[in-house]
Amino acid sequence: MSTFLEGVAVDARKARSSRVLWSTGLLLVLGVNGLSTTIVFAARSGNAQLVAKLGPQAASGDWTAMLSAAAQITSAGGLLALGVGISWLYGREFAEGTVSGLFGLPVSRGRLAAAKLVVYAGWSLVTSLLTVLVLLGVGVVIGLGVPDAAAVAGLGRQFALALLTAVIAVPAGWASSVGRGLLPGIATSVGILVLAQVAVLADIGSWMPFVAPAMWALQPSTSAAPLLMVPIVPLLFGAAIVISWHRLQLDR
Amino acid sequence: MTENVLALTDVSRHYRGGAGVRGIDLSVRRGEIHALVGLNGAGKSTLMKLMVGMLRPSSGRVEVLGTRVDAAGLATWSRIGALLEHGLIYGELDCRTNLRLAARLRTVPTEQLGPMVEAILTELGLTRYASVRARRLSQGNRQRLGLAAALQHQSELIILDEPTNALDPSAVIALRGALLRRVATGTGILVSSHHLDEVARIATRISVIADGRMVGTLDPDGVDIERAFFATVHKAMAGIG
């Protein structure tokens, strides 16, 4: 097995026993589903205030309402949850002092950092998939019916949004590496969230990679072309993470 | 085959504010224990960090197993064991899993993992904690686990920073035995300590460091080497003053 794959296997084993990743993932799945269901019930009961806040899509109380609510929650809460996940993957090595054990190994620190990205991708994929599968189940149970073609497309969009949200949270991993702890990463997640929310509310910057996923998911009629900008984030910040770990010195 | 498994030549590393180490020459030969002794803040940990790449030298040359540290790769690092600071211990994992993962990061073949881990658990008296999560261990047993992770694979060079910290007397005896067995097979070992502990006393050579400089050596077989150590340090510090 290559040293990179050894790194992936070791970090995946650590992730499997991580309370942080389990609880954050569970919180995301249950949070998106719980809040979306609540919003559907509120819309069905004719809560005018809620409809005014969430827009006409939520008023219908059907799959459209469920998926619109899920998209809004994912683009905000999901970003924070996924940001906590990647911040922990990198920041815990500094916070717990285990980073000192990652020197002088046949598996280089650059490869270990890249291996963590693979583990993060796997965790994000499973969490995103579970969120959508539970949405599907809950939707059927609360009487939204078997999803039609539009709802199926909406579920697919929700899955893509969750994955794209994971992608734009990668800078949090870089911040945790450079800042040598969890808090810089979490603060960066909050910063990305604020930036994205302000841009969406102001209806500007839809081409920005941090804004494009939420804009696309919430307004399906808009062009998906800005999503092409999103891969820039993991490429740029993924490379920055690997370089920062490769060059790391424990001089402070 | 090179005689030295570790060689530092005129190595300096400066920190902001003036601290650091200056003009250090140090070596460890195959089949010897070299103890590096100095008071707190003397520069022992800085030197050891330079040996595993945690720090890069401002000047000079650091070689492990005949290769410069910045050029060392898989073939070199897989033959080295080290414990500095916290070590590779994850609280959420039990002792056995921690050791398996540490071995995997040293590219130990899968079929060797089981017997190797069980052997080191026995050697360092950790068998009854094998299934206990590391976060539940006492400080002494965590140190023992860190040592086990550094010693379990076949190493030609072992670097241990203050290995007896927090160890009880039985663990110190177990460690001393483990080191002597490895030295007998040709492994070179560097241990640091802030005092002449039980491990420093089995050293082949003892070097004294003070204020970032090598200031002398002690005869391991000498009489009252504790007194000789303090005399060496005080003489060096008086010279600086």
Image: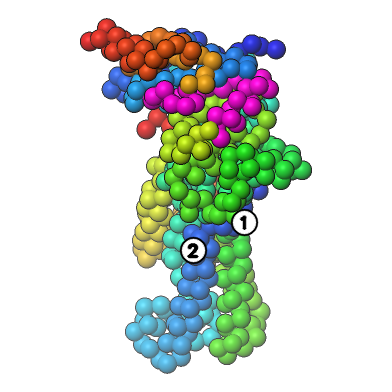
Question: Residue reaching furthest front?
Answer: B223
Relative depth, front residue between A150 and B109: B109
Residue that lies at the very extreme toward the right in this rendered image? B111
Using residue A162 as the reference point, say whether residue B227 is left or right of it.
left
- Depth check: A9 or B166 in front? B166
Reading the image, the residue beneath label 2 is: A24
Q: Is residue A162 above or below residue B74?
A: below
The C terminus of chain B is located in which quarter?
top left
Residue B183 lies within the magenta run: yes
Asked whether the viewer can see residue A102, the reply is no
Colouring chosen for the image of the structure: rainbow
Q: What segment is highlighted magenta in the picture?
A: B174-200
Viewed as shown, does residue B127 lie left or right of A185?
Answer: right
Q: Residue at x 46, y 62 (%)?
A: A81
Residue labelled with disc 1: A122
Residue B6: x percent and y percent? 57, 17
